[in-house]
Image: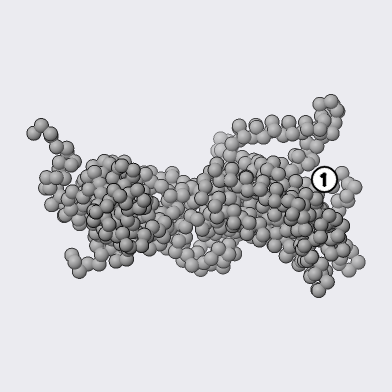
Amino acid sequence: MSEKKNVLRLDNVTMQFGGVVAVDDLSMEVNEGEIVALIGPNGAGKTTAFNAITGVYEPTNGMVSFLGKPIVRNHPQGKMKKQYKGSDAEKFANEPVLNPTPDRITALGMARTFQNIRLWKTQTVFDNVLIAKHMRRTSGFLSATFRANRAEEEAQRAEVRELLRIVELEDVSDELATSLPYGKQRRLEIARALATKPQLLMLDEPAAGMNPQETDELTAFIGRIRSEFGMTILLIEHHMDLVMDISDRIYVIDFGKLIASGTPEEIQNNQRVIDAYLGVDDDA
Amino acid sequence: MLDKKEANRKNLVSLVAVLAFLAVVLLLDQIIAPTSKLYMLLTVLQKGSVYALAAVSMNLLNGFTGLFSLGHAGFMLIGAYTYAIFSIPSDARDTVYQYFDAAVRVSLPEVLGNAIGAFGTALGVLLAVLLAGLVAAVFAYLIGLPVLRLKSDYLAIATLGFAEIIRAIFQWKKLGPVTNGSNLLKNFARCSTFKLSLGGATVSLSTFVPVLIATVCIALIVLLVNSTYGRAFKAIRDDEVAAEAMGINLARHKMLAFCTSCFFAGVSGATMAMVLSIAQANNFKSAMTYEILLMVVLGGIGSISGSVIGALLFISASEWWLRGLDSGSFLGITAPTVFRNGFRLVVFSIIIMIVVLFFRKGIMGDRELPEALAGLRRKRAKKAEEVTGRE
């Protein structure tokens, strides 16, 4: 495991909103080619962790590194300083704060999907994927307006067609994104993320709201993405079948804290995980 | 491959249609005399093209990027003043700036005209128009820095406020040497004097020039909207969070849209000064912004051809068709007690209310003219098919 390249690494990431600590001192890593799942009961802080990684939130403390380079880093500021005094949260106190906007992080090679699908509603399937290619353009504003970038435009369109063929959405490419059935919208969102040419794909509850059959299809689809693109994937999920089927490793958090990590078999037999999911009977 | 051919054919058809339109305007410019009853048509075309450009540029911001801005009158003012200041000929300068000592002593059409003749004069006018757009865009950049952090209604209120501030500043006495204070600017290069001498014949260009400027600018906006940047703007409008997550730099793209929109607002302001022969800050009140917004809504938010149609309809109605409501007789009915000054606005308001209540998407919705026509044709073909099927 240690020879593999480290793609994503979290060090002591803490995310506090007022008095609520949504993510508490979370450290984890994702290696190249792996599918890693982040699971936990409702409200455990999974999506918050996601948002802290992708630049949507500014973490209260901690560091996120991508491909060996720190991309997000913060230490307790202002009022929080007192609260974290003396704890090992002061580890990053002397390091400069890094807080890039989500688009900068995507440009580095990290693309995400959303729990509640966020496609561009008035755009066609094809354009949804094509717009994600906008970031990888080299042409400027004027050359794009005066169509001096025709070669690049054609190349991008060809790439989009190829991508849509791989995800089997080519037959609906001219339809409005929102007219697709739910399962296909999910697939389109993943295709859109892939269009940004990421090295790490982050899926936020891809199977949310899906029936068992759609979930099975999605499981196969994610497996195919990994094999075809050699993609490293981090996913948040509730569907245990899906998680146990495709994950190489699993991190479990509860109330923002990491309570277990390991292979699917290890997690399935971990007492603390079972307690967190099923609840502990206090009378026993 | 077939798609490409089809697209090329469509582009060619649009190009031919636009060129034909321009040719017709040039022809009308020659055959309609100022004394003719139809002269109103030329006035409508002149003013209509100014407002069409303004409406399309506002649509670029409000309809395509989802930034609800109400500062358009302010940026048009900047454009009108920049154009006027830089095209007042030197011998007219002292009569225009009668209370001040004019600070800007350059007239672009005159300088270039003296250097390279008639062509230089035209080039100078063109440069002054471009400068008007650029100055408006620079102001937009400065105002955009703080304002574009705001969203929806807040952005609208802030831009509205800035537009009013601009108007106040341009009327400020201390800036008199540049802006002529609250007095109007006149005697600069204007439409009614635009002519082309070919051999012995003179070709009047007074309507053709504003229409040409508007057409070229609107064509540029169409190109922009269909480019990769235009698609990014639409993505920001549809879902900002997703756009940012897909690598679109929100601050940069919003600023680009804002400055581009204001550039064209400035050009439209310059054209307006050309058409009206005067530039006065008092004309550019927030009511003008509302009028432009109305054209955008009438035509359909997110449709460029809609904005053009909306602007032409609005101007035709207010300048021509509904004129009679203000001056005594309308549609053959003479009733000076009812049809007097201001009644036109009453009727106008009612029409607008009807449109907003019953045709919320405007005339075109978010479609463009070729699309809508193709849809219409398909519908008719289907109907015809049904009829033959029944037989």
Residue in the picture at 63% in, 59% down: B138
Up/down of A149 relative to B359, above or below: below
Task: Please give the name of the residue rendered at 62% of the width and 41% of the height, measured from the top-left corner.
Answer: B297
Task: Please say if B319 is above or below B75.
Answer: above
Residue B42 visible in the shown view: yes
For mark 1, give the secondary structure.
helix
Residue B241 percent location from the top left of the image? 43, 49
Query: On the rendered structure, is B278 left or right of A214?
Result: right
- Could you tell me which residue is drawn at 84 percent across and 34 percent down? B327
Subunit under mark 1: B
| Type of amino acid at the residue the image marks with label 1 | Met
Q: Is there any visible trace of residue A183 in the rendered image?
A: no
Residue nearest the observer in this picture, A227 or A89: A89
Q: Quadrant of residue A126?
A: bottom left
Q: How many marks?
A: 1
* Residue designated by label 1: B40
How is colour applied across the structure in the image? one colour
**Residue B355 position within the rendered picture, expressed as x and y whole percent measured from the top left:** 64, 34
Which of B93/A84 is in front?
A84
Return the x and y of residue B184 as percentages of the image width and height: 80, 51
For the C terminus of chain B, the image quarter is top right
Tell me the crowding category of disc 1: few under 14, some 14 to 19, or many 20 or more residues within 10 angstroms, Cα based: some
Q: Residue furthest left?
A: A284
- Quadrant housing residue B359: top right
Q: Between residues B188 and B323, which one lies in front from this camera angle?
A: B188
